[in-house]
Image (cartoon, rainbow, N blue to C red):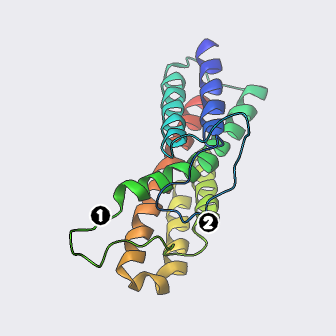
């Protein structure tokens, strides 16, 4: 029971960490950054919500691994809702952080450095829907659903992927988003099994 409580608390903190007010990730133009603002808390460094969310998800995973009996009843419903919330909210801070870490740094005299314009439009909405679909596929025991999601996304984005920067962002964003959703879904599956 203690491990279940710890897992649920860590899931709630992981979902909540993504909602902390933070400075925009340097790769996101200020006009595209979400307007989260809490007056009593100064904006945190851009990487803090991503790190807290990932740490709490890891703690929830460890707690789920030591749960001796499957979670049932209302606790299972809460766990599943929190898992989907973590997949959605955590991904919205983790994916931009990975984009920032993976961006190309300009070489001296190189005019081909990354500019601050978004490469693929609609990435936030598409990524959110993608993470929901992946985590639901994991929780329902239908891993083929992940392949369907990736195939649909790849076909829909195909015309835009001729630009090398767009294909790079597509691969990095998709892998990060899917891995995050799989991690969240794995915690939920661990609690339910």
Residue 131, percent from left and from top: 59, 55
- Which circle's residue, 1 or 2, is located before the other in the chain? 2
Q: Which residue in the rendered view is the most extreme toward the top? A: 2
Toward the viewer: 49 or 78? 49
Q: Quadrant of residue 83?
A: top right
Residue 31, percent from left and from top: 63, 67
Which numbered disc covers residue 43?
Answer: none
Which numbered disc covers residue 105?
Answer: 1
Residue at image position (60%, 19%) is 6
Q: Residues within 10 Å of mark 1 (few under 14, many from 20)?
A: few
Report whether 78 appears left or right of 108.
right
Q: Residues within 10 Å of mark 2 (few under 14, many from 20)?
A: few
Residue at image position (54%, 37%) is 53
Residue 174, percent from left and from top: 47, 62
Report whether 146 appears left or right of 15.
left
Toward the viewer: 188 or 97? 97
- Residue 140 visible? The answer is no
- Assign a secondary structure to mark 1: loop
Residue at image position (64%, 40%) is 20
Residue at image position (45%, 55%) is 176
Residue 192, percent from left and from top: 62, 32
- Assign a secondary structure to mark 2: loop
Quarter containing the N terminus = top right
Asked if the residues shown at circle 1 and circle 2 are in contact, with their CB atoms under 8 angstroms apart, the answer is: no
Residue named by callout 2 = 32
* Cα separation between marks 1 and 2: 21 Å
């Amino acid at each position: 029971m203690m491990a279940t409580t710890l897992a649920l608390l860590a899931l709630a903190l992981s979902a909540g960490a993504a909602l902390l007010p933070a400075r925009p990730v340097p790769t996101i133009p200020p006009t595209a950054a979400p307007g989260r603002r809490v007056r009593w808390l100064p904006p945190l460094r851009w990487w803090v919500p991503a790190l807290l969310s990932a740490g709490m998800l890891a703690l929830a995973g460890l707690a789920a691994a030591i749960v001796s009996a499957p979670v049932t009843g209302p606790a299972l419903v809460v766990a599943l809702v929190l898992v989907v919330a973590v997949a959605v909210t955590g991904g919205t801070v983790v994916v931009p952080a990975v984009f920032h870490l993976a961006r190309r740094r300009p070489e001296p005299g190189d005019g081909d450095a990354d500019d601050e314009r978004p490469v693929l439009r609609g990435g936030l909405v598409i990524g959110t829907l993608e993470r929901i679909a992946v985590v639901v596929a994991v929780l329902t025991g239908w891993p083929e659903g992940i392949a369907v999601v990736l195939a649909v996304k790849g076909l829909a984005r195909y015309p835009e992927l001729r630009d090398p920067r767009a294909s790079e962002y597509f691969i990095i964003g998709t892998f990060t988003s899917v891995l995050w959703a799989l991690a969240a879904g794995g915690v939920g599956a661990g609690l339910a099994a």
